[in-house]
Each structure stands twice: as structure tokens, then as C-alpha cells.
Image (cartoon, grey):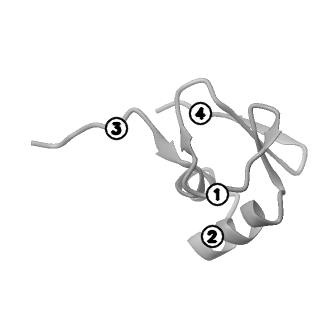
Amino acid sequence: MTEEKDYIQLDQFLKLINVVASGGEAKHLIREGAITVNGEVETRRGRKLRNGDQVEFDGHTFAVSI
């Protein structure tokens, strides 16, 4: 049986929406403070995102929909 998650981690989300090509690239952007979640700078790559969260990078906003 597969367990469905109600979240996605920030680094995985960035790869999914093609903002980054690798986990290492995601880690770098997150650590340097280039990503905001719901209007606040996020520096944890394992941050759990849920439906309705807003991720912003480089002037673009992405809505989380799982």
C-alpha cells in the first residue's frame, strides 16, 4: 500500500517546477535566501509545503498544489 503525503519538501518542489535541475542547486538557492515561502525567506530545504503555500523566486510566484 502506498502512503500519500499531504506535503512536498521545498527542494523537491523547486525541482518539480523546473526552477532548478538538481538538489544541489536547490540547496544553494535556499541557503543564500533566494526563496520565499508565503512571503518569508526560507532557508530550510526540507521545509514542508502544503496546498495553497506560495513559493517565490526571481520575481515569479508558484502556488503549491499536491
Number of residue marks: 4
- Which amino acid is tagged 4? Val
Instruction: Please tell me whether mark 2 sits on a helix, a strand or a loop.
Output: loop
Give me the disc on residue 64: 4
Helix, strand or loop under label 4:
loop
Classify 10 Å Cα crowding around label 1: few (below 14), some (14-19), many (20 and above).
few
What residue type is disc 3 on? Lys
| Residue 63 image position (x, y, % from top left) | 66, 31
Residue shown at 73%/60% (left/top)? Answer: 30
Q: Earlier in the sequence, mark 4 or mark 3?
A: 3
Cα gap from disc 4 to disc 3, whole angstroms: 13 Å
Mark 3 or mark 1, which is nearer the start of the sequence?
A: 3
Residue type at mark 1: give it: Asn
User: Is 57 displayed left or right of 55 in the figure?
Assistant: right
Instruction: Work out whether mark 2 precedes mark 3 in sequence or the reverse, and give the earlier one.
Output: 3
Residue underneath mark 2 = 21
Residue occupied by mark 3: 5
Element under disc 1: loop
Which amino acid type corresponds to the residue marked 2 in the rendered image?
Answer: Ala
Name the residue located 28 percent from the left edge and 37 percent from the top edge.
4
Lower sequence index among marks 2 and 4: 2
